[in-house]
């Protein structure tokens, strides 16, 4: 699977309170969560995410609360992949569980700029910055994790296994 | 190669003799926890997976504490969804408003968590139960759903940081100062994916409420879990609460640690975390220029009876500053009763503070004390991210109950010595 789009760039320690503020946690509706995604960090995220489908961030992306509403809001905003220097561990696990593609790549996190055009190959972990011509190699998610992500999350994955 | 406390607990729960950092293990779970925010998402996933019955109704805790008593219609709808599920599945540890408290205050108090147990909770502060020698960690709602359905969860065995506590805390210094200082030392991702294992002669000088506070904020250093040895103080605490058998684990002498951090409690001073990250720590007495509008004393971090006593010791005979709203939030109904019995409620009210029902409330910007643009709070809660307690233009300073109470009186960041001896 490849994601080809422009980049929305953020810094270190993007926490789950800015990804989806707790005042909006009184719902489980994915579209409603998406409508408030990142609003405390970046008022223009909603507009940007209409055309830009890749988030590139710094260290410890998704730190803080365990709210699964955070990766749900990002995924429901149409983001195809989040690349970061590192992820907070609960967010990392949640993203895979709900089928939100993520890649850890410190080199890309450091080099890629806001607005760059990127091609991300989830199968190989190769990230190409079309704007600068640079290429980065991240460790791809192992096949069974990719299968979970491709199923749209572990619930669908488990269901398919049960039905198979 | 020897094992850490955490590694021993995980190995036993996976039914293997030993394990090493980096290994993936499927572990049997002793408790699966959720609250009124994360529970409904998990319940949706539970049914989406095709599950129909929970693996064991006695090993699931569903605790409505974040937005209850229901703050609006949407919250009421989510609380109802969890209540209906709890009734249908005959969940033993479901507590209704009036009996419920803040999850991480309630579960240890009621003896629902014990040493050696493996616990997951769809709440990041589930790591609190490391204070009683359990392996407990926060997960998302989907992992909670899988846990409810199967009674199992997979884990990557974590490396560990050894935190050696030496000496004895000075008067007014507390567990909160220990953990804020540690986060300041190693950073908010300083223990990412790792365990924080506390040890050293200094542990004996920290009471159980203090240890619960410390383990509670392990997540604020990015840690998977924080864990304490089960000593006589812990055993005495458990004896009053837990009537089932439990097993305590000690680390092997040759257990491998990626790093050792030593904190000399003799030298530790009262510490605050300035906006907007818990790692922005500074001695409280160096922040006297910061005027404040609100003080919150409570939460899963500091809503226990020792915290209430520390705040009351400062507020006794004092008045909350004219400009300040001081909100005291007991963690559980038992804490409420103890506060009443010990006369603490009179102290709070006479000082001009409000004493509320147990709730997570303002900690996460939910209700009962939201901040407006430009307002600043001193709070005994656990996070000071942008917008955490309200408007993105507001600020939260994290502190201990004693520092928070002193700040309420002075109308700025203050230490108790400025008010009482």
Image (cartoon, coloured by chain):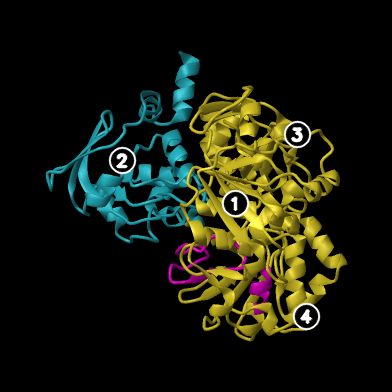
Chain colours: A cyan, B yellow
Circle 1 residue: B163
Residue B205 coordinates in the image, percent (x, y): 74, 59
For disc 3, the neighbor class at 10 Å (few under 14, some 14 to 19, many from 20) is few
Closer to the camera, B257 or B176? Answer: B257
In which chain is the residue bearing label 2? A
**Labels 4 and 1 share a subunit:** yes
Q: CA distance from mark 1 to mark 3?
A: 22 Å
Q: Give the label on residue B414, or none.
A: none
**Labels 2 and 4 share a subunit:** no
Circle 3 residue: B247
Secondary structure under tag 1 reads: strand
Secondary structure under tag 4 reads: helix
Q: CA distance from mark 2 to mark 1?
A: 36 Å
Residue B182 coordinates in the image, percent (x, y): 56, 59
Foreground label between 3 and 2: 3
4 or 1: tag closer to the N-terminus? 1
For disc 4, the neighbor class at 10 Å (few under 14, some 14 to 19, many from 20) is some
């Amino acid at each position: 699977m490849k994601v080809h789009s422009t980049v929305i760039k953020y810094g270190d320690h993007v926490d789950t309170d800015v990804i989806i503020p707790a005042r909006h946690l009184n719902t489980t509706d994915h579209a409603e969560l998406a409508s408030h995604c990142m609003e405390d960090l970046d008022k223009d995220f909603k507009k940007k995410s209409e055309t830009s489908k890749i988030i590139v961030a710094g260290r410890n992306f998704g730190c803080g609360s365990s709210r699964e509403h955070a990766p749900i809001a990002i995924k429901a905003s149409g983001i195809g992949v989040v690349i970061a220097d590192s992820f907070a561990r609960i967010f990392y696990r949640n993203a895979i569980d709900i089928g939100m593609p993520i890649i850890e790549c410190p080199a890309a996190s450091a080099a890629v700029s806001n607005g760059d055009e990127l091609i991300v190959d989830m199968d190989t972990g190769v990230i190409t910055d079309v704007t600068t011509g640079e290429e980065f190699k991240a460790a791809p998610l192992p096949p069974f994790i990719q299968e979970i992500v491709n199923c749209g999350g572990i619930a669908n994955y488990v269901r398919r296994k049960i039905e198979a | 190669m020897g094992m850490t406390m955490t590694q021993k607990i995980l190995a036993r729960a996976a039914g293997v003799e030993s394990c090493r950092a980096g290994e993936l293990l499927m572990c049997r779970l002793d408790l699966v926890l959720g609250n009124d925010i994360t529970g409904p998402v998990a319940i949706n996933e539970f049914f989406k997976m095709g599950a129909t019955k929970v693996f064991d109704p006695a090993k699931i805790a569903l605790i409505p504490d974040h937005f209850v008593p229901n703050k609006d219609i949407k919250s009421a709808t989510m609380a109802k969804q969890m209540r209906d599920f709890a009734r249908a599945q005959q969940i033993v540890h479901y507590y209704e408003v009036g009996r419920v408290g803040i999850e991480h205050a309630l579960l240890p108090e009621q003896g629902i968590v014990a040493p050696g147990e493996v616990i997951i909770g769809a709440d990041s502060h589930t790591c609190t139960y490391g204070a009683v020698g359990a392996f407990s960690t926060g997960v998302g709602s989907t992992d909670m759903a899988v846990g409810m359905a199967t009674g199992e969860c997979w884990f990557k065995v974590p490396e560990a940081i050894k935190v050696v506590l030496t000496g004895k805390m000075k008067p007014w210094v507390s567990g909160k100062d220990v953990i804020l200082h540690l986060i300041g030392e190693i950073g908010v991702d300083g223990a990412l994916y790792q365990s924080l294992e506390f040890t050293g002669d200094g542990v004996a000088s920290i009471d159980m409420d203090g240890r619960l506070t410390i383990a509670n904020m392990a997540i604020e250093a990015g840690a998977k879990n924080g864990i304490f040895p089960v000593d006589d103080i812990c055993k005495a605490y458990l004896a009053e609460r837990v009537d089932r058998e439990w097993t305590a684990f000690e680390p092997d002498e040759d257990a491998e640690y990626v790093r050792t951090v030593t904190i000399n409690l003799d030298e530790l001073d009262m510490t605050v975390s300035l906006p907007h990250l818990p790692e922005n720590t500074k001695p409280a007495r160096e922040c006297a220029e910061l005027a404040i509008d609100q003080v919150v004393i409570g939460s899963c971090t500091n809503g226990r009876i020792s915290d209430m006593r520390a705040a009351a010791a400062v507020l006794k005979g004092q008045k909350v500053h004219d400009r300040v709203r001081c909100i005291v939030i007991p963690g559980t109904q038992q804490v409420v009763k103890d506060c009443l019995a010990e006369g603490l409620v009179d102290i709070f009210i006479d000082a001009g503070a409000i004493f509320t029902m147990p709730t997570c409330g303002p900690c996460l910007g939910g209700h009962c004390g939201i901040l407006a643009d430009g307002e600043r709070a001193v709070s005994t809660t656990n996070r000071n991210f942008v917008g955490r307690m309200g408007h993105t233009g507001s600020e939260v300073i994290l502190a201990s109950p004693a520092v928070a109470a002193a700040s309420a009186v002075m109308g700025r960041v203050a230490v108790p010595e400025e008010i009482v001896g």
